[in-house]
């Protein structure tokens, strides 16, 4: 029989929560219940009752608890969900490697397990004390909740704050309930006293209870005689409670008190065997009003008691306890958990603590870079510069921070180390360590200046000088004109190879690849990035994929994309956002605009989950390009502005992407003067560009059409020259060759050349370029008086744009055909697509809907369609919105009804 006393006064909140349980079961829809309130208000009791009743309704229940100490164990509470209870969701063998996976891979693996588990029945996944959650656990929740939409999964979370409410509460198609537990009323307190005392409480008892301010835990302590009655404000712990716990602690025999204090420092339940090792001569007596035996060991009856006991321990004693626990955990092979205790025990000059923290940071670097960075900073701060090990530990900490791409912290430690050395080689090594975070952070001028300053020092070893020259060359690929940057990268690579230094070679190869890409020499770029991947593995896989795309080798690019998605090693973790970015371009270039748009939004969301803006700029640019093709100029302008506002990077990162898109937007709005004014400076320097944006096949056609529409022949001529230069630098690449022929023919009004270009572009893997060829050929045929042949070409261009879901370009072709007197029934059908229902879905959304309705998981659907899991999720949310449904069962029913009616 369940003790109902902790649930007094909670009937309204429980009713809402249990309605959520029933809704998940009956509607097969997802939900989140967040229970919040101060310590002692009854959150755990509510969560326990939800889990109990859900279990009675044949839900499988996974339950876990966050704690303050295990914050350094990335994702531990979420991982624990999978193995909790009598019916774990996964096997011990499946669970064993999870703690070693990086966050993105871990989220995908857990989602896959949960999708399989929910096939056997609905799930309740409950996490208590979310206010203690580590960063990775919070990331996992942000990733998993939207990933599992439409499945019968109810998340039940408790927290002292309203953590994640703003993020989980706004996920589409997730029913979110926030239950803020209020203080108990006087009648509820009286009823609790009646249950506890077996009779009506006296007036004196009621007066004492009123002093608890409606906190049920404190009320129980009063009734059990721990408190004589106290006054407290909401969310606070009364002084009388603290005093009562301290009195109880002082009354204990010394062996028992030592055990209680050690448990308070441990911060989590400890098995009796561990306690016996940690407290020799411990008493078998357990103070029942403070501690309780649990399946995990001896623990405090409530977190408030533990926190109060810990606050009463003298600081020196607490440090000694943490050190003892840390030593025990290190001996048991649990260095990360030991590091949590070392953080609390460390004092200035404590070498052992600094070494433990630095080692833990290195272990965490590939799993949770933010947590690793915190430990590295603490390790560095523990020692003073006068300590003979300070410099060595500082270099280890610098490497962790650089890997985590924490630019400011990396530079802060590097500068402290630099201030205490005069050795040219050491200075060069320290400056080289800052190169990658500065590059990824877009701080190119600073990277260039730091390398230049180090190179001016006399006497660095050849290998060190080679690294600095390579890092400087990398920065200058975004700062100098293309040919100058390429020559600098070439010389840096020569020097690096002569020095036979691998680090210098990798930096120089990256610089050479970037410089070649910016010049539009894509075979050279591919060679450099391919060699770079042979040295560093998957870190530069995305660059290799993009080089393949620019060479029209989309099948090969897709092979590498598929392989990257199948690779579950944590080594690929850092490359995953870049892989998602490469997939965006794959979809966009192959005319899958719906997938590209969904992928762009998914990449922006991924950046939000990871707390980084890497690739957010490019994702917003692609989203804006899709919006322009759909004719939504206002939304496109908003995305361009958002991209331009992304902070932390030099202007070199945002140029020329932002002005290119703003020029295109101005032209789409009919403001050709503004468009040419924006684009003219870029077109004039495009052949020496500092980024590869102007070299994407298709931009030259946009430039040419804007120039001719604006009546600016010089502008159009420059576009033709740029297209021809692209073809010259990329011989036998159909997209470059066809565009050069096309623009040259249009400029000369040469029908034969235009016809030839249409034939060449018809072999391009890019539907948009096929459409350019067909549309320009059709218009040339119209001008030549061959209307029948012209309509064939224009119809083909219209169909291509329609398949791509590019209504703005499609409308342009339709207008040309209308002026020529043509009419087509398909135009009316395309113009009247409904806003809701099956016919409202795009072709990409219909493909995803069909697979999910057939029982595919998000991951298997992504693999089938050669798109990312994030893209599947974005499409699925759009499907739910347009069909007005909330679950995958409803989706299957809707599709069955649709197919029966057709």
Image (tube, helix red, strand yellow):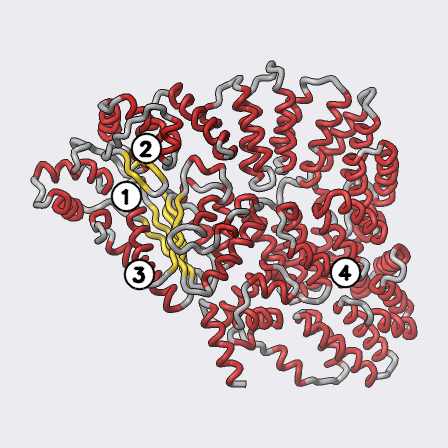
Residue 99 percent across, percent down from the top left:
53, 44
Q: Which mark is residue 580?
A: none
Q: Quadrant of the C terminus?
A: bottom right
Of marks 3 and 2, which one's residue comes earlier in the chain? 3
Q: Residue at x 69, y 22 (%)?
A: 418
Please report whichever mark, 4 or 3, sits nearer to the chain's N-terminal start. Answer: 3
The numbered mark, 4 or 2, whose residue comes first in the sequence reads 2
Q: Residue 255 at what x, y percent from top left? A: 29, 23
Quickly name the residue at label 2.
306
- SS of the residue at dot 1? loop
User: In the drawing, does residue 429 fall left or right of residue 390?
Assistant: right
**Circle 3 or circle 2, nearest the eye:** 3
In the rendered image, residue 599, in percent from the top left (x then y), is placed at 62, 59
Residue 150, given in percent of the width and then of the height, sits at 47, 65
Quarter occupied by residue 28: bottom left
The residue tagged 4 is 556
**How far is the residue under mark 4 from the one under mark 1?**
59 Å
Query: Is the Cβ of the residue at disc 4 closer than 8 Å to that at disc 2?
Result: no
Disc 3 marks which residue? 56
Pointer 3 with pointer 1, Cβ within 8 A: no
Dividing the picture into quadrants, the one containing residue 154 is bottom left
- Circle 3 packing at 10 Å, graded few (<14), some (14-19), many (20+), is few
Q: Tell me, yes or no, if residue 31 can be seen here.
A: yes
Looking at the picture, does residue 412 appear above or below residue 745?
A: above
Q: Looking at the image, tell me whether mark 4 or mark 1 is earlier in sequence order.
A: 1
- CA gap between label 3 and label 1 equals 25 Å
Q: Residue at x 64, y 20 (%)?
A: 391
Residue farthest top in this picture: 386
Query: Mark 1 highlights which residue?
Result: 41
- Asked if residue 176 shows in the view, the reply is no
């Amino acid at each position: 029989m369940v003790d109902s006393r902790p649930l007094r006064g909670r009937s309204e909140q429980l009713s809402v929560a249990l309605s959520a349980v029933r809704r998940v079961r009956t509607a097969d829809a997802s939900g989140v219940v967040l229970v919040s309130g101060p310590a002692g208000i009854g959150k755990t009791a509510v969560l326990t009752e939800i889990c109990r009743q859900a279990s009675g309704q044949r839900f499988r229940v996974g339950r876990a608890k966050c704690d303050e100490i295990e914050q350094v164990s990335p994702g531990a509470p979420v991982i624990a969900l999978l193995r909790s209870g009598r019916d774990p969701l996964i096997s011990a063998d499946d669970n064993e490697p999870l703690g070693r996976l990086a966050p993105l891979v871990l989220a995908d693996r857990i989602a896959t397990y949960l999708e399989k588990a929910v096939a056997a029945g609905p799930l309740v996944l409950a996490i208590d004390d979310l206010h203690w959650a580590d960063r990775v656990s919070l990331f996992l929740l942000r990733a998993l909740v939207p990933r599992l939409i439409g499945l019968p999964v109810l998340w039940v979370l408790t927290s002292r704050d309203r953590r994640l409410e703003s993020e989980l509460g706004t996920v589409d198609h997730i029913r979110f309930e926030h239950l803020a537990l209020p203080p108990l009323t006087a009648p509820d307190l009286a009823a609790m006293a009646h249950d506890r005392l077996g009779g009506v409480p006296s007036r004196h008892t009621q007066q004492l209870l009123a002093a608890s301010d409606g906190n049920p835990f404190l009320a129980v302590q009063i009734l059990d005689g721990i408190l004589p009655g106290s006054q407290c404000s909401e969310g606070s712990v009364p002084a009388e409670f603290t005093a009562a716990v301290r009195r109880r602690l002082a009354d204990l025999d010394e062996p028992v008190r030592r055990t209680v204090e050690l448990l308070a420092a441990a911060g989590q339940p400890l098995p009796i065997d561990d306690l016996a090792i940690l407290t020799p001569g411990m008493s078998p007596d357990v103070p029942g009003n403070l501690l309780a035996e649990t399946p995990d060991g001896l623990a405090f009856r409530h977190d408030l008691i533990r926190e109060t006991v810990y606050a009463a321990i003298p600081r020196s004693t607490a440090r000694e306890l943490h050190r003892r626990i840390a030593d025990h955990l290190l001996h048991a092979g649990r260095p990360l958990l030991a590091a949590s205790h070392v953080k609390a025990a460390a004092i200035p000059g404590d070498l052992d603590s600094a070494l433990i923290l630095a080692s833990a940071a290195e272990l965490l670097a590939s799993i949770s870079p933010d947590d690793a960075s915190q430990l590295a900073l603490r390790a560095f701060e523990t020692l003073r510069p006068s300590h003979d090990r300070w410099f060595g530990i500082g270099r280890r900490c610098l490497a962790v921070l650089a890997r985590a791409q924490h630019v400011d912290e990396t530079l802060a430690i590097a500068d402290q180390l630099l201030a205490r050395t005069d050795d040219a080689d050491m200075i060069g090594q320290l400056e080289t360590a800052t190169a990658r975070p500065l590059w990824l952070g877009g701080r190119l001028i600073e990277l260039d200046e730091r390398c230049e300053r180090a190179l001016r020092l006399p006497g660095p070893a050849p290998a060190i000088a080679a690294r600095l020259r390579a890092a400087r060359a990398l920065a200058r690929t975004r700062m100098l004109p293309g040919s100058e940057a390429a020559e600098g990268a070439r010389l840096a690579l020569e020097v690096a190879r002569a020095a036979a230094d691998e680090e210098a070679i990798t930096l120089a190869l990256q610089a050479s690849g970037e410089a070649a890409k910016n010049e539009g020499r894509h075979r050279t770029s591919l060679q450099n990035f391919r060699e770079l991947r042979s040295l560093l593995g998957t870190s530069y896989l995305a660059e290799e994929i993009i080089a393949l795309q620019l060479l029209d080798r989309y099948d090969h690019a897709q092979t590498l994309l598929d392989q990257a998605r199948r690779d579950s090693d944590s080594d690929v973790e850092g490359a995953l956002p870049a892989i998602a970015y490469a997939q965006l371009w794959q979809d966009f270039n192959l005319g899958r605009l719906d997938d590209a748009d969904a992928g762009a939004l998914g990449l922006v969301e991924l950046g939000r989950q990871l707390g980084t803006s890497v690739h957010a700029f490019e994702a917003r640019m692609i989203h804006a390009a899709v919006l322009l093709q759909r004719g939504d100029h206002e939304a496109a302008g908003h995305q361009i502005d958002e991209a331009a506002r992304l902070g932390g990077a030099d202007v070199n990162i945002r140029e020329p992407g932002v002005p290119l898109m703003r020029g295109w937007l101005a032209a789409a709005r009919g403001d050709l003067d503004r468009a040419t004014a924006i684009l003219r400076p870029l077109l004039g320097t495009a052949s020496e560009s500092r980024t590869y944006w102007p070299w994407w096949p298709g931009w030259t056609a946009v430039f040419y059409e804007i120039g001719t529409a604006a009546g600016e022949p010089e502008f159009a001529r420059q576009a033709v020259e740029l297209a021809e230069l692209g073809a010259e630098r990329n011989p036998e690449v159909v997209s470059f060759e066809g565009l050069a022929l096309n623009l040259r023919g249009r400029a000369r009004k040469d029908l034969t050349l235009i016809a030839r270009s249409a034939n060449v572009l018809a072999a391009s893997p890019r539907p948009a370029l096929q459409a350019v060829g067909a549309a320009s050929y059709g218009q040339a045929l119209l001008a030549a008086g061959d209307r029948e042949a012209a309509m064939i070409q224009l119809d083909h261009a219209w169909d291509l744009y329609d398949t791509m879901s590019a209504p703005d370009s499609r409308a342009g072709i339709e207008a040309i055909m209308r002026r020529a007197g043509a009419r087509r029934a398909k135009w009316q059908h395309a113009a009247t697509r409904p806003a809701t229902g099956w016919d409202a879905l795009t072709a990409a959304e219909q493909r995803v809907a069909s697979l999910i309705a057939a029982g595919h998981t998000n991951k298997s659907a992504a693999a089938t369609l050669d798109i990312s899991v994030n893209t599947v999720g974005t499409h699925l949310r759009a499907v739910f919105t347009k069909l007005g449904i909330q679950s995958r069962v409803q989706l299957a029913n809707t599709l069955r009804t649709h197919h029966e009616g057709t």
